[in-house]
């Protein structure tokens, strides 16, 4: 009988198995029920700072003075006069004279990676971006989970980009990404330690022919703050944008805000001096099923710059823990913190690797403990936990079809999900409970509260651990 030689990828998997890289299949621990019979009586009452429920928005507004927040200019910017800005979103071509500050390509992927890696050296940028893209090329173990390879990255992204660049190295001015949105997440601020939240750039990948694809990338930057005064400075910088009409002056003011967190050396105490917290992707372009990954700057063994490599996905367990006693025990032990959104999914739980290396999902994915459904975890705890995961937020828990920001053609703004806009029907979760969402309106009310708050109030705010 003829023996079939093993492929290199198969041998690699066997090697990982031999090394114990997979999360071990272990006997499940006994189920430990939550002692919380009425979770809402134990956890603090939900507010727009700690809950996504749209029913809380009107009641959650605490400001007592006139406050007008324009979300499309201050919080979730998708206007084509911004995302197709001739000067700031392209590298070539004749553009009308821009208003300063104006940097050519300031809002392109290629310019933003300069700040992430702390250099504008073309060779270094090519090496580091290629290294990040190669994270899809091979199977990789992340926190004990073997994340399968998606080798199509070579033919679908790297090679066409390299060809467009002349064949020697990736030219950042040829990066195949289209800007979809610029986002302020001031609702993610913290006071221990202080941070003003995040500023974000959302991109859609273009194929070799320049067509949109089902591959989204989001760069999420920390807004550094030494204290309450800095938080308010950031908040007012974004808020003041609402007073300007869209056009050259608005774009100049917006660049003044974004330069403060995207430029080289924007955050000297962080790796590469970059303010980047993480880069996330959400795609089915390279392989099925839909998968979300997270990348963070990690020290290189050969010296600077730090490399942008895969990390465990925030607030999301490994999929293998779905419908297990281990998951139920974690949620039941942390029920009050989950309801207050003051928890962080740990790398390990009960000595078992718990946090996921990536988050693959389908439309019907809802996190729950052992069957029967909705019996091992209080339904409110189950829903809040599942909503905060990558696959829950981008799926059934919000009634979203994988993407909160749709890819777009030039000259057309991105369509946003019902979860963000508040459109669409009530979302009924797997336990039969209805939920309404309008997250941009929630962030709008929160920003209004923020810019009219004192430092005493901000210093007393509870921590929140939203990531989506």
Image (cartoon, rainbow, N blue to C red):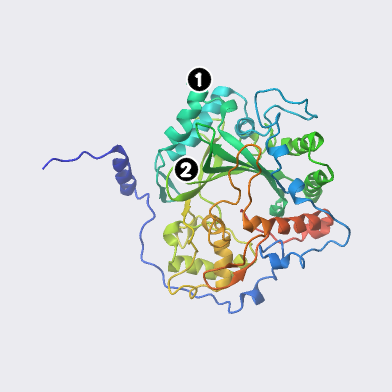
Label 1: which secondary element: loop
**Which numbered tag is attached to residue 19?**
none
When asked about the image quadrant of residue 393, the answer is: bottom right
Instruction: Report the residue that reaches farthest toward the right.
Output: 65
- The image shows residue 432 at horizontal and vertical percentages of 55, 73
Query: Of 178 and 173, which appears nearest the observer?
Result: 178
Above/below status of 381 relative to 138: below
Which quarter of the figure is the N terminus placed in?
top left
When asked about the image quadrant of residue 326, the answer is: bottom left
- The image shows residue 421 at horizontal and vertical percentages of 67, 56
Q: Which residue is mark 1?
A: 166
Query: Of 329 and 127, which appears nearest the observer?
Result: 127
Number of on-image labels: 2
Whichever of labels 2 and 1 marks the residue nearer the N terminus, that label is 1
Point 77% across, 58% down: residue = 445
Q: Is residue 267 visible?
A: no
**What distance separates the C-alpha of mark 2 from that of mark 1?**
24 Å
Above/below status of 121 relative to 467: above
Point 39% across, 67% down: residue = 28
Above/below status of 107 relative to 282: above
Point 60% across, 42% down: residue = 408
- The image shows residue 356 at horizontal and vertical percentages of 48, 53
Query: Of 428 and 50, which appears nearest the observer?
Result: 428
Q: Which residue is mark 2?
A: 285
- The image shows residue 129 at horizontal and vertical percentages of 53, 32
Q: Residues within 10 Å of mark 2 (few under 14, many from 20)?
A: some
Query: Of 267 and 287, which appears nearest the observer?
Result: 287
Point 49% across, 64% down: residue = 367
């Amino acid at each position: 009988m003829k023996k079939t030689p093993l492929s290199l990828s198969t041998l690699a998997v066997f090697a990982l198995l031999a090394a114990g890289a997979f999360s071990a299949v272990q006997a499940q621990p006994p189920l430990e029920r939550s002692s919380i019979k009425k979770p809402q009586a134990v956890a603090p009452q939900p507010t727009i700072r700690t809950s996504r429920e749209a029913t809380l928005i009107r009641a959650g507004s605490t400001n007592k003075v006139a406050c007008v927040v324009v979300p499309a200019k201050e919080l979730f910017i998708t206007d084509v006069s911004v995302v197709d800005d001739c000067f700031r979103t392209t590298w070539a071509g004749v553009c009308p004279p821009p208003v300063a500050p104006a940097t050519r390509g300031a809002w392109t992927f290629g310019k933003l990676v300069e700040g992430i890696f702390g250099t504008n050296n073309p060779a270094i940028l090519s090496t580091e971006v290629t290294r990040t893209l190669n994270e899809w090329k091979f199977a990789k173990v992340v926190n004990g989970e073997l994340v399968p390879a998606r080798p199509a990255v070579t033919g679908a992204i790297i090679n066409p980009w390299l060809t467009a660049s002349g064949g020697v190295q990736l030219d950042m001015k040829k990066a195949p990404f289209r800007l979809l949105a610029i986002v302020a997440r001031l609702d993610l601020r913290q006071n221990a330690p202080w941070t003003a939240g995040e500023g974000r750039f959302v991109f859609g990948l273009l194929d070799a022919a320049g067509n949109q694809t089902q591959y989204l990338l989001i760069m999420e930057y920390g807004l550094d703050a030494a204290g309450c005064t800095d938080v308010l400075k950031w908040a007012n910088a974004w808020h003041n944008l609402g007073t300007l009409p869209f056009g050259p002056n608005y774009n100049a003011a917006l660049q003044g805000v974004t330069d403060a967190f995207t430029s080289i050396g924007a955050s000297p105490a962080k790796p590469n001096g970059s303010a980047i917290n993480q880069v996330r992707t959400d795609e089915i372009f390279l392989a099925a099923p839909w998968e979300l990954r997270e990348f963070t700057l990690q020290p290189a063994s050969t010296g600077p710059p730090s490399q942008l490599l895969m990390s465990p996905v925030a607030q999301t367990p490994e999929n293998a823990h779905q419908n297990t006693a281990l998951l139920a025990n974690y949620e039941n032990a942390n029920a009050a913190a989950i309801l207050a959104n003051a928890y962080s999914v740990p790398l390990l739980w009960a000595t078992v690797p718990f946090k996921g290396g990536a988050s693959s999902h389908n439309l019907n994915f809802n996190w729950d403990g052992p069957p029967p459904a909705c019996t091992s975890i209080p339904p409110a705890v189950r829903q809040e936990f599942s909503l905060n995961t990558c696959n829950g937020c981008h799926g059934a828990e919000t009634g979203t079809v994988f993407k909160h920001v749709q890819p777009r053609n030039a000259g057309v703004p991105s369509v946003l999900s019902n979860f963000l806009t508040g459109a669409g029907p009530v979302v009924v979760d797997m336990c039969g409970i209805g939920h309404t969402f309008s997250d941009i309106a929630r962030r709008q009310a929160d920003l209004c509260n923020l810019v009219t708050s004192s430092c005493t109030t901000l210093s007393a705010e509870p921590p929140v651990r939203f990531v989506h």
